[in-house]
Amino acid sequence: MKIPSLRTKDLLTVTDCSREEILELFEFTGKLKAQTKAGRQHHILKGKTLGMVFEKSSTRTRVSFETGILQLGGHALFLSKNDIQLGRGETIGDTAQVLSRYVDGIMLRTFAHDTIIGLAENASIPVINGLSDSFHPCQALTDFFTIYEREKDFSHVRLAYVGDGNNVACSLLLTAGILGVDISIACPGKYMPDRKVVDAAQKLAAATGVTVQITSDLDEAVQGATYLYTDVWVSMGMEKDTAKRKKDFKKYQINRKLLDKCAPGCRVLHCLPAHRGEEITDDVMDSPQSIVFDQAENRLHLQKALMCALMGKNRKGVFSWI
Ligand code: CP
Ligand code: NVA
């Protein structure tokens, strides 16, 4: 199996990768997934260690990275901010330099995106963004892989995202632009995605010949959608605004009525965790049109491919297992 090569040292946002690199990553993800399902071992990262630094909660990211590296013959260290010196004031730069002496890659889930930039700048080993306030690249790559494995190409895909213009929405926008997928985002006026990200996505989309639509109009956004996506109204770190957000987002819900306005057979996506009854109703989440648990599973396969591409090389840039 040919391991995909990424030119980047780190994955901080999806713009670290080109369209060709992402498609190569998807091919490899599919192969790893098939081997895993067939019970075949692939110890591509034998003896390698991933440090997983968490400043926020996680179910999927933690379990999929930890299980993923184990399946690749490596080992993960769960490093909660509360338990390491980072939580007592050691700088991110010093933490990066120290971890670089012990482990072969770092996954960070954090608040400010600058923290992850600081980590990557000071680490001599690959750094993977496991979610920041601004971006969630592993999620968006997984989501487009989930679509790709069903569709085989993106020419008939139209993705509509409904809800908060948050980290997930921003990563979806950029990935759609890179891969050439029509995307439409519907958010209440105050919760639109970052203007700089929208501009960047529009530039990428112009190059791949697709459209990026940002609107407050739900009906306009979901027209012709073949995939309908949502995320929580209150992201981690925004809990103090919960009451206001619940009011502001009330009509931005994926329910049967909205789904029926999409293209026939439209599939439903959600990065999870879901707040059932808020951004998505139970009947839609549990319907045959929902592929949210396939998405969750694919985090494992996609991140295994990503770790191979980033951590499979030795420090001279040569794949150590070849
Ligand atoms: N989707 C996602 O990143 O889930 P966790 O917060 O559980 O990791
Ligand atoms: N937007 C959500 C995603 C959780 C996976 C958050 O940041 O909390």
Image: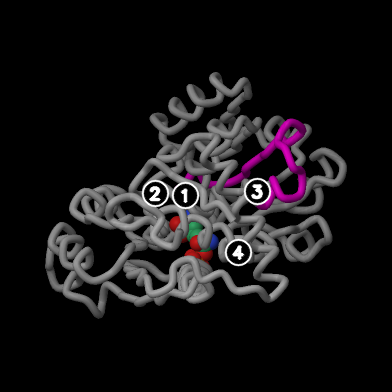
Q: Image point 70% across, 47% down: which residue?
A: 147
Crowd class of label 3 (few under 14; some 14 to 19; many from 20; radius 10 Å): many
Residue at the spot of label 1: 137
N-terminal of the pair, mark 2 or mark 4, is 2
Q: Image point 67% across, 39% down: which residue?
A: 159
Whether label 2 touches label 1, CB < 8 Å: yes
The residues bearing labels 2 and 1 have C-alpha atoms spaced at a distance of: 8 Å
- The stretch in magenta equals 146-167
N-terminal of the pair, mark 3 or mark 4, is 3
Q: Which tag is nearer the camera, tag 2 or tag 1?
A: 2
Where residue 190 appears, x then y in whole percent? 46, 38
Q: Image point 12% across, 68% down: which residue?
A: 89
Image disc number at residue 229: 3
N-terminal of the pair, mark 2 or mark 3, is 2
Crowd class of label 4 (few under 14; some 14 to 19; many from 20; radius 10 Å): some
- Judged from the image, the secondary structure of the residue bearing numbered disc 1 is helix
Split into 4 quadrants, where in the image is the N terminus? bottom right
Image disc number at residue 75: none
Residue at the spot of label 2: 11
Where residue 177 appears, x then y in whole percent? 55, 31
Horizontal side, residue 24 vs residue 108: left or right: right
The residues bearing labels 3 and 4 have C-alpha atoms spaced at a distance of: 12 Å
Q: What residue type is labelled 2?
A: Leu
Residue that lies at the very extreme toward the front in this rendered image: 322
Q: What residue type is labelled 4?
A: Ala
N-terminal of the pair, mark 3 or mark 1, is 1
Q: Image point 55% across, 19% down: which residue?
A: 206
Q: Which amino acid does label 3 sit on?
A: Tyr
Q: Which tag is nearer the camera, tag 2 or tag 4?
A: 2
